Image (cartoon, rainbow, N blue to C red):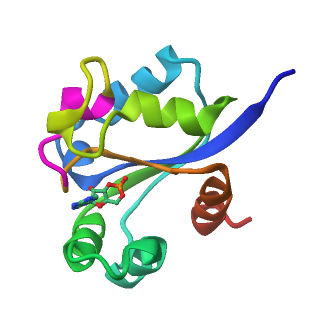
């Protein structure tokens, strides 16, 4: 039985700033993802706080929100079979130092903060995050 899912991906400021947008999109396409929706935007810190609300009690919350709102980002809806877990595998570990060879974060990530991409961590959060950026 096919299990087509959608997940939210963000190309973060560190990667947009280094002109990696097209290379990263190509990695998604090469791995069978369809880019169903995409837009390049810059968000307010208050919007980043709302997006990352699940992390509000974490010590890194303030820096994380300041960072995500510090420059242009590319937000995308990716679609394929089992897209949520597939995207997490393709991104690699949160900390680029721990990421496997061949993953986006290993290839492009600079640090745990500047780790180039965000991806939804569950099907439930994918729906919430897609709705956050692409409310029609
Ligand atoms: P992301 O997948 O966008 O989700 C939350 C982000 O917080 C994460 O990627 C990291 O870039 C950032 N972050 C900073 N410090 C930590 C940490 N100690 N543990 C997890 N995430 C962190």
In the picture, measured across the screen, residue 98 lies left or right of residue 2, that is left
Foreground pick, 122 / 43: 122
Q: Residue furthest right?
A: 1
Image quadrant in which the N terminus is located: top right
Q: Is residue 104 above or below residue 50?
A: above
The location of residue 122, given as percent across then percent down, is: 59, 50
> Which residue is pictured at 25% across the width and 69% down the height?
64
Observer able to see residue 35: no
Image quadrant in which the C terminus is located: bottom right
In the picture, measured across the screen, residue 79 lies left or right of residue 22, that is right
Residue 109 within the segment the image draws in magenta:
yes
Magenta residue span: 104-112
Residue 84 within the segment the image draws in magenta:
no
Image quarter for residue 55? Answer: bottom left
Foreground pick, 127 / 34: 127
Observer able to see residue 100: yes
Q: How many marks?
A: 0
In the picture, measured across the screen, residue 3 lies left or right of residue 44, that is right
Q: Is residue 55 above or below residue 4?
A: below
The location of residue 108, given as percent across then percent down, is: 20, 33
Ligand 1's image quarter is: bottom left
The location of residue 67, given as percent across then percent down, is: 22, 67
> Which residue is pictured at 52% across the width and 51% down the height?
120
Image quarter for residue 61? Answer: bottom left
Q: Is residue 19 above or below residue 27?
A: below
In the picture, measured across the screen, residue 129 lies left or right of residue 104, that is right
């Amino acid at each position: 039985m096919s299990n087509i899912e959608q997940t939210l991906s963000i190309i973060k400021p560190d990667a947009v700033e280094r002109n990696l947008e097209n290379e990263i999109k190509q990695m998604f396409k090469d791995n069978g993802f369809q880019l169903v929706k995409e837009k390049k935007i810059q968000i307010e810190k208050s919007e980043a706080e709302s997006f990352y609300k699940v992390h509000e009690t974490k010590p890194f919350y303030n820096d994380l929100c300041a960072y995500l709102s510090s420059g242009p980002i590319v937000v995308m809806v990716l679609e394929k079979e089992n897209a949520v877990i597939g995207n997490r595998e393709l991104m690699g570990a949160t900390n680029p130092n721990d990421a496997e060879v061949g993953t986006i974060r290993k290839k492009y990530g600079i640090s745990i903060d500047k780790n180039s991409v965000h991806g939804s961590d569950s099907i439930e959060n994918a729906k919430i995050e897609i709705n956050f950026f692409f409310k029609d």
